[in-house]
Structure formats: structure tokens, C-alpha cells
């Protein structure tokens, strides 16, 4: 008697990685489950068994990206806002397909496919916590922490997105630009001190 095929975590991880790569390269509308299965060296049955269908697979890929991103942020949180900024860029450069899948809007046309709100917001908690900690220590202004966090996120996200899109001359010093931007962000949110 033949044993049933068991679709393990390795197959699941491979499917998620392949999905992000294919969607990044082809766009979500052009990617089929057969394409994903073939690229992951498995069957469409594995996809249906593990995820249910295309929308669920795409959602799982985005959620996986947010979980991985959130973990990198939690690992860097001990270093405060500056380390979170460095970790943001490092993760994006290490996972460009996932980054674009999560933030690039490719899935906007898929009504049934969006990140799980708790998973996406959980990935940003280290930033909010670092803002509050910096406020408590008097290193940044006591403005609304959400406003500050969104301002910081917008700055680093914009630069990383430009770098990944290669919106530059080949000799552009992205590490230097990014470091200067992190310093500018720190100055922008520093407490106002009378002269």
C-alpha cells in the first residue's frame, strides 16, 4: 500500500518563496498555481492541500514576508531607532521580492488577497515601541507616537524602495545616503531646545 504524500514545512516554505519570486517577476495575474508548483518542484495538490487556492497562497506569502520582517525588527529593537532603521534596509535588500510583494501594490487588484491585519501591524510594533522608549528617554519630541512612527517609516521606506527600484546612477552611495537620512530623521524628531 502506498503511503500518502505528506506536504511538510519545507515544501510550504519553498512554495512561499517561489510565489514571492514569481509574482515579483510576472505579476499576480500571470502567475498560475501550475507555475508555482513547477518552480517549487511539487504538485498543485500540495498547494491546494497546504493553502487552499491562489488567493490563500498569495496571502500566505505576504503574511510570511511580514512575519520575517517583523522578526528582523524585533531582533534589532534592543538597539533602538537607529538599529531598526539598519535592520529595515538589510531585510529589504536580502528579500527584495518579498519586500515588493508586501509594499509594492502588486496585489492591490486582488480583493481577496491582502495581508492579515494582525500580522502586518505586529511587524511594526518594534518601531512604535522604540518611538515611545525614545520619547520616555527625552531623545525625541513628545508628539503623537503614531505620527512619529509613520514619519520615520515613510522616510526609510521611500529610500529603500528607490534603492530596490534602482532609481539611481550606478555609482550612487546608497549606504551613505541611507545613513545620512537616518541622522536627519533623528534631528527632525529631536526635542525642540530654545537657543
Image: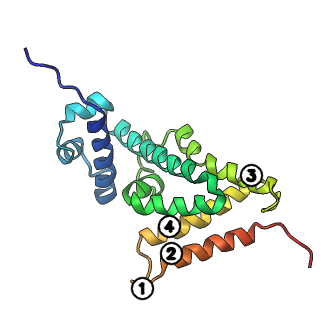
Residue at (61% x, 52% y) in the render: 77
In this rendering, the answer to whether 137 lies above or below 8 is below
Q: Dots 4 and 3: beta carbons under 8 Å?
A: no
Which residue is denoted by mark 1 in the rendering?
Answer: 171
Mark 2 and 1 residues: CB-CB less than 8 Å, in contact?
no
Give yes or no for contact between labels 1 and 3 (Cβ–Cβ under 8 Å).
no
Q: Earlier in the sequence, mark 1 or mark 3?
A: 3
Instruction: Provide residue 54's location: percent of width, then percent of height.
Output: 32, 39
Residue at the spot x=27%, y=31% of the render?
8
Horizontal and vertical percent position of residue 101 = 41, 53
Packing grade of label 1 (10 A; few <14, some 14-19, many >=20) is few
Seen as rendered, the residue at the extreme top is 1
> CA–CA distance between discs 4 and 3?
25 Å
Q: Residue at x 83, y 57 (%)?
A: 142
Q: Nearer the viewer, residue 5 or 82?
A: 82
Q: CA distance from mark 2 to mark 4?
A: 10 Å
Q: Which residue is label 3 attached to?
A: 133
**Spot occupied by residue 195 in the image (x, y as percentages of width and height):** 92, 79
Q: Determine the secondary structure under disc 4.
A: helix
Question: Which-is-in-front pick, marks 4 and 3?
Answer: 3
For disc 4, the marked residue is 160
Vertical order, 148 against 48 (above or below): below
Residue most toward the right? 194
Disc 1 element: loop
Measured in 3D between alpha carbons, the distance from the residue under mark 1 to the one under mark 3, in whole angstroms, is 37 Å
Foreground residue, 92 or 61?
92
* Tag 2 residue: 175
Label 2: element kind: helix
The answer to which quarter of the image holds residue 186 is bottom right
Amino acid at each position: 500500500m502506498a503511503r500518502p504524500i505528506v506536504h511538510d514545512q519545507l515544501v510550504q516554505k519553498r512554495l512561499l518563496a517561489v510565489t514571492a519570486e514569481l509574482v515579483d517577476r510576472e505579476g499576480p495575474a500571470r502567475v498560475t498555481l501550475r507555475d508555482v508548483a513547477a518552480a517549487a518542484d511539487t504538485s498543485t495538490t500540495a498547494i491546494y492541500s497546504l493553502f487552499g487556492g491562489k488567493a490563500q497562497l498569495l496571502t500566505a506569502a505576504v503574511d510570511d514576508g511580514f512575519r520575517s520582517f517583523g522578526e528582523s525588527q524585533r531582533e534589532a529593537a534592543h538597539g533602538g531607532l537607529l538599529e531598526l532603521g539598519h535592520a529595515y534596509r538589510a531585510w529589504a535588500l536580502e528579500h527584495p521580492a518579498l519586500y515588493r510583494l508586501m509594499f509594492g501594490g502588486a496585489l492591490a487588484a486582488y480583493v481577496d488577497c491582502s495581508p492579515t491585519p494582525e500580522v502586518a501591524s505586529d511587524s511594526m510594533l518594534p518601531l512604535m515601541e522604540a518611538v515611545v522608549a525614545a520619547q520616555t528617554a527625552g531623545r525625541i519630541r513628545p508628539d503623537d507616537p503614531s505620527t512619529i512612527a509613520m514619519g520615520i517609516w515613510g522616510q526609510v521606506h521611500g529610500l529603500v524602495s528607490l534603492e530596490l527600484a534602482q532609481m539611481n546612477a550606478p555609482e550612487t552611495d546608497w549606504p551613505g545616503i541611507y545613513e545620512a537620512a537616518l541622522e536627519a530623521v533623528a534631528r527632525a524628531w529631536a526635542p525642540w531646545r530654545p537657543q
